[in-house]
Image (cartoon, rainbow, N blue to C red):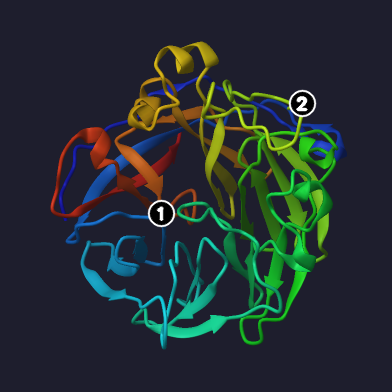
Amino acid sequence: MINARVFLVLMIVSVFGCTRGEKGTESTPDSNEWELVILDSIEVDYLGSVGGGDFRNGKGVFFNFQENKLIEFDSTGRINHEISYPTDGPGKVKYPTQLRYTDDGRLFAASFVGWLYELNADLSLKQEITLSFPSQAHDGGGFFRNLDYWNDSLVSYYPGRDGASPYDPHFIRDHFLLEKIDPKTGGSIPLIKIPSTSRYSSDKFFERPWVQFGIEGDRLHLALSNEPMIHVYDIKDEAYLYTVDFKPAKFLDNGEHQKEYQYISGRRMLDGEIRQLFVTEKGTVVYYDEGIEEDIFVQNELNLPKNFPKYKDFQKQVLKIISQDSVLSNEIIVPYRIGRFMNIEKLDKPFYALRDDDFIGEEQEYITFYKLQLVQK
C-alpha cells in the first residue's frame, strides 16, 4: 500500500433545500456540509484500461475491454483472480462492463449490449441468464450503474420488451425502463415508468439520456443523465413516490429540439451530465459534470476528438449528497486527478476511485485507486 498525502478538497457554493415532485412539499434549509478527503492509495499490479467495476465488502473487480478480462483485487491492491473470456464457444462471456456484487458475495455482470451473467468466486462463468426477448440496446455500460440486485432478483436496464427500441425518441415516455429478472429462470417483469415530473414524459424532443439507478432497502432511485432530478420509487409496491431536484449551481442543457434525432451536446456545446449515482442507507450521492457553454466549446474546437481531453479545462466535476429527508449538501468539487468511483457503499465508510493517470500525465506499470472518505462537517 502506498501512503499518499491527505488533502482536503475545496468546497464551494452551499445549496440547501429541494422540491419533492408531486408531493409538493418543500423542506426547510438545513446544514449538510461535507468534504472529500483522500486517505490513501493502492496499486493493483496490472497494466491496462478500466472499463467498468464495483467494490463491496473489501474486494473490487474491474473490466479490461482490450482483453475481455476481469480482474478482482482486495483493499491492499493484491490481485485475487483474473480471467480472460472467450467471446464464442463454451464459457463465453462478452464484454461484462456492468458489475455488481451482492451483499453475500455473489457477482453478476451485464454486457453493454444486453447479455447477463452470474460468475463464480474465481470469476469463471457460472451461468448466462437468458431472457425471453433480446435487448435492443447496442451501447452504454462502463461505469453507468444500471444493474442492481433486490430480493433475490436482478434489476436491469434491459430495453427490448415487445420490441421497443431505446433509440425511439419517446422510448422513455412510452415504455417501462427496467426489468426485474429471476436469475434462475430468466423470467422477468417490467418495472418503473418515468413520472410526470420529468420532461421526458412529454411529447417534446430532447437529447437521448442515459438511465442510471440504485436500490437501498425497498427504495429505488433513478436518474436520467441530462436532468438534475432523482426519481424515487417503492420497488416492492412498484409505485412512484416523489422526485428530488438536486439543484446544481451549474448544469447546462441545450433544451427542447425542433425535431427527433437531433443532437447538439458534443457538437456545439456540452450538456451537464450525471456521471454516476450511488444510493446508500443514509443518503444518495450524485456525481456530475457541469457542461460547457457554446462560445467556449466553439472557440476551442471541442467537437474534435483530439480536443476531448480539454473538456476538463472548462467544467467542474461535482459530488452532491441528498439526505434521506431530501436535504441537499454543499457542492463538493472533485479534482480531475480522481476519475470514476468504484462504488459508495455507505456515507460513513471509505470507498475507492480510479486515479486518472492521463490527467496527471504519468505513465505507470500499474493501476492506482484512491481510497477516499466523505466527512460531514
Residue 121 point in image, percent of width and height: 38, 82
Percent x, y of residue 89: 42, 85
Q: Which residue is mark 1?
A: 342
**Labelled pair 2, 1 in contact (Cβ < 8 Å):** no
How packed mark 2 is, by other alpha carbons closer than 10 Å (few <14, some 14-19, many 20 or more), is few
Q: Nearer the viewer, residue 130 or 87?
A: 87
Q: Which residue is mark 2?
A: 258
Could you say which quadrant of the image residue 123 lies in?
bottom left
**In this rendering, is residue 164 above or below 222?**
below
Going by the image, does 193 lie left or right of 350?
Answer: right
At which x and y percent is residue 21? 81, 37
Label 1: element kind: loop
Residue 234 at what x, y percent from top left?
77, 59
Q: Earlier in the sequence, mark 2 or mark 1?
A: 2
* Number of numbered labels in the structure image: 2
Q: Quarter-wise, where is residue 225 in the image? A: top right
Disc on res. 271? none
Q: Secondary structure at mark 2?
A: loop
Along the viewing direction, whichever of 188 and 240 lies nearer the viewer: 188
Which of label 2 and label 1 is nearer to you? Answer: 2
Instruction: Give the Cα distance between marks 2 and 1.
Output: 38 Å
- The amino acid marked with disc number 1 is Met
Residue 302 placement, left or right of 2: right
Q: Report the side of 334 relative to 72 (left or right).
A: right
Rendered position, 300 above or below 234: above
Q: Is residue 110 left or right of residue 173?
A: left
- Figure quadrant of the N terminus: bottom left
139, 100: nearer the viewer: 139
**Residue type highlighted by circle 2:** Gln
Mark 1 surroundings within 10 Å by alpha-carbon count, few (fewer than 14), some (14 through 19), many (20 or more): many
Image quadrant where residue 272 sits: top right
Q: Is residue 376 above or below residue 178?
A: above
